[in-house]
Image (spheres, grey):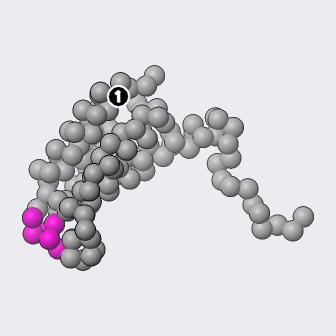
Amino acid sequence: MSAPRARLAEAADQLTGRLARLGAPVRAARHRTRLHSDFTHLGVAVPDLRRAVTTLRRELPPLTRADALALAGLPWSGDVYEHRQAAVDVLTQHARQLASAKRSAGHCARPPDTTSDS
């Protein structure tokens, strides 16, 4: 069963709010300089970001493939580096659902080997 779109939007808002509270301006400036980035940086440490995504995952009911993709797409749309990083982590934490949906749809888990000479 798929989660309502409004619930996913609320979850994404909760996640971005958590990330804003975890940010540190000094770290944000260092990240922006080190990465030569034009993105807005909040200065969230990677372990803290991953914990925030894990907490969110545990608060939600199990997500379908479509839900995981929709949830990841919501924070991705902005220009905040940590929001995009969190979107990638959402997909990483739901990799099993993404892969199993692909296999059950009749697709290969891996691309076919095109290197053999047969």
Up/down of 75 relative to 10, above or below: below
How many residues crowd around disc 1 within 10 Å: few (fewer than 14), some, or many (20 or more)? few
Q: Residue at x 67, y 42 (%)?
A: 107
Left or right: where 49 falls relative to 20: right
Left or right: where 21 falls relative to 36: left
Q: Residue at x 27, y 39 (%)?
A: 12
Q: Amino acid at mark 1?
A: Arg
Q: Residue 41: within the magenta?
A: no
Residue 50: tell me if it is visible. Answer: no
Q: Quadrant of residue 27?
A: bottom left
Q: Quadrant of the C terminus?
A: bottom right
Left or right: where 43 falls relative to 37: left
Residue 67: tell me if it is visible. Answer: yes
Total numbered labels placed on residues in the image: 1
Q: Residue at x 23, y 43 (%)?
A: 15
Q: Residue at x 11, y 62 (%)?
A: 24
Q: Main secondary structure of the magenta part?
A: helix
Q: Quadrant of the N terminus?
A: top left
Q: Residue 28: within the magenta?
A: yes
Q: Secondary structure at mark 1?
A: helix
Q: Which residue is mark 1?
A: 5
Q: Position of residue 17 (x, y in %)?
A: 16, 44
Left or right: where 69 falls relative to 36: right
Q: Nearer the viewer, residue 53 or 43?
A: 43
Span highlighted in magenta in the image: 25-31
Q: Position of residue 115 (x, y in %)?
A: 78, 68
Q: Position of residue 18 (x, y in %)?
A: 17, 46
Up/down of 22 relative to 98, above or below: below
Q: Nearer the viewer, residue 93 or 31?
A: 31
Outermost residue, right side: 118
